Image (tube, rainbow, N blue to C red):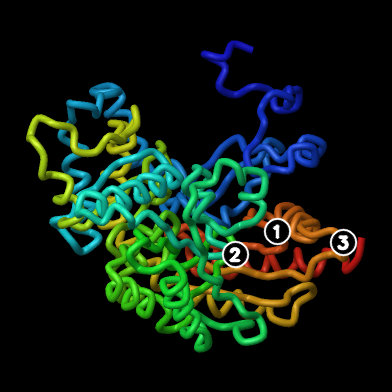
């Protein structure tokens, strides 16, 4: 195979040994490979020619579906004009324009945007900004970060330290960032099972932040970081009033509140960001994924104006923040982002996501009572189906359901024994209901024991 010119190798005779795949059961996968060869609109095409519905918008990142012509044209034009521009000591106009556009969309047009290439990088960047901000203000003792159990903040060393998913952390304890504590997660099946939207029970769980503050003293705590909706751990929806109470406690003690909006940013809940959905304003917001429909890696941190200005007190010729990446504000990624935001605006796709949310809610909650289902959760255009695991084999049942769903033309996301559904914003009501019916058939086709 010529690696330069042959973009479509023979999938039947492909050597699978060399790619060590991320977050994948590599041995299981390579024994039964599932290969994607094309994508268009809300569908993927597999190597065997099957067309399957993209039930999770890629990995929460393709709300426009795939190969949207506006985005394709923007990237093609950009690569012919300016394929790369250094962001150290130089800049290109489109990146400045995009930063202004994102700040305005987030509702604070005077904020700054620091571009990175992924959600993981966005989180580590936000943590560094938070600690440095306090140091610049003379509060150098404020170094502690508070995360949350079951939180997912990417796979950087900062992200896994503040994250709360055991499997992501257990091998890397010697590398963890010191001085991290965790709030309890908010999922309680005894009180919340089959809740529609925000659960009524659980706002009091935010009071645990006061306990943590009392334990460590507020003068040592720089920031609290949470996902407004915990996506990767299975669509854990915050209880009513929970996020507002976190905001109140952080404000009371001078602690920065960071919202990890890598999944919720740019419309997943039917508003530009989750903060506006819940009526809570964070000090820093991370984003990635949907900002440019995942066409070229891009992420960033939205930084409150006064926080950014705290870095600007030294000589004008001095570097204020010793941090950044070669590909920060990459021209192709930025072009894709402008095109994506154009499409969202012109086709009113965030509004469409909001309109589809009750369709998804009604459909997915109809799975209550189906085989294996122990809980259904939803908010905005996102939902999760919790499955009873096979005894002694956690995670296997979700794989079996996933495989049955794939055979039925649906490609959901599975993690542990949870299925997640977050269809593209371009989906029709029929596609959303058909997706859930495909999951229903997959559940019924999955045996109770193995």
Give the position of the C terminus as an image quadrant: bottom right
Question: Residue 398 location in percent, x, y?
Answer: 74, 59
- Viewer-closest of 215 and 327: 215
Residue to which mark 1 is pinned: 416
The residue carrying pointer 2 sits among few (fewer than 14), some (14 to 19) or many (20 or more) residues within 10 Å by Cα, namely: many
Q: Which residue position is annotated with label 2?
A: 234
- Labels 2 and 3 touching (C-beta < 8 A): no
Q: Earlier in the sequence, mark 2 or mark 3?
A: 2
In this image, 404 relative to 253: left or right? right
First along the sequence among labels 3 and 1: 3
Q: In which quarter of the image is residue 364?
A: bottom right
Residue at image point 57% right, 53% down: 54
- Mark with earlier residue (2, 1): 2
Q: How far apart are marks 2 and 3 (CA)?
A: 21 Å
Q: Name the residue under label 3.
A: 392
Q: Around disc 3, counting alpha carbons within 10 Å, would you say few (fewer than 14), some (14 to 19), or many (20 or more)? A: few
* Disc on res. 354: none
Say whether residue 85 is left or right of residue 52: left
Of tags 2 and 3, which is closer to the observer? 3
| Secondary element at tag 1 | loop
Label 3 – label 1 distance at C-alpha: 13 Å
Return the x and y of residue 217 as percentages of the image width and height. 39, 69
10 Å crowding of disc 1: few (<14), some (14-19), many (20+): some
Front: mark 3 or 1 = 3
Q: In this view, does 202 lie above or below 274?
A: below
């Amino acid at each position: 195979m010529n690696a330069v010119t042959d973009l479509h190798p023979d999938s039947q005779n492909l050597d699978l040994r060399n790619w060590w795949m991320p977050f994948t059961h590599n041995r299981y996968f390579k024994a039964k490979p599932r290969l994607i060869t094309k994508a268009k609109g809300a569908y993927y095409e597999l190597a065997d020619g099957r067309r399957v519905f993209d039930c999770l918008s890629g990995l929460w990142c393709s709300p426009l579906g795939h190969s949207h012509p506006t985005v394709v044209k923007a990237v093609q034009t950009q690569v012919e004009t300016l394929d790369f521009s250094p962001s150290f000591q130089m800049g290109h106009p489109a990146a400045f324009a995009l930063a202004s556009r994102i700040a305005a969309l987030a509702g604070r047009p005077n904020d700054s945007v620091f571009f990175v290439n992924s959600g993981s990088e966005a989180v580590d960047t936000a943590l560094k900004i938070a600690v440095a901000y306090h140091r610049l203000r003379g509060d150098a003792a404020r170094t502690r970060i508070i995360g949350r159990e079951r939180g997912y903040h990417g796979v950087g060393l900062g992200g896994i330290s503040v994250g709360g998913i055991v499997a992501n952390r257990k091998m890397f304890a010697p590398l963890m960032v010191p001085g991290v504590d965790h709030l309890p997660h908010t999922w309680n099946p005894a009180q919340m099972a089959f809740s529609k939207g925000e659960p009524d029970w659980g706002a009091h769980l935010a009071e645990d932040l006061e306990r943590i503050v009392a334990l460590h003293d507020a003068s040592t705590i720089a920031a609290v970081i949470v996902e407004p909706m915990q996506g990767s751990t299975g669509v854990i929806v915050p209880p009513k009033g929970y996020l507002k109470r976190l905001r109140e406690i952080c404000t009371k003690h001078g602690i920065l509140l960071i919202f990890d909006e890598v999944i919720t940013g740019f419309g997943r809940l039917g508003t530009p960001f989750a903060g506006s959905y819940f009526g809570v304003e964070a000090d820093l917001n991370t984003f990635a994924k949907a900002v440019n429909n995942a066409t070229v890696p891009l992420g960033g941190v939205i930084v409150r104006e006064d926080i950014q200005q705290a870095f600007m007190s030294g000589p004008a010729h001095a570097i204020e923040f010793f941090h950044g990446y070669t590909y920060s504000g990459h021209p192709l990624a930025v072009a894709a982002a402008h095109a994506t935001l154009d499409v969202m605006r012109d086709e009113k796709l965030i509004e469409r996501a909001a309109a589809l949310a009750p369709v998804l809610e009604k459909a997915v909650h109809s799975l209550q009572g189906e085989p294996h289902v122990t809980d259904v959760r939803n908010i905005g255009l996102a939902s999760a189906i919790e499955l009873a695991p096979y005894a002694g084999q956690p995670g296997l049942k979700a794989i079996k359901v996933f495989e049955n769903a794939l055979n039925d033309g649906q490609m959901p996301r599975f993690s542990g024994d949870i299925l997640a559904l977050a269809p593209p914003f371009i989906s029709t009501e029929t596609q959303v209901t058909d997706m859930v019916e495909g999951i229903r058939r997959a559940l019924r086709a999955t045996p109770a024991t193995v």
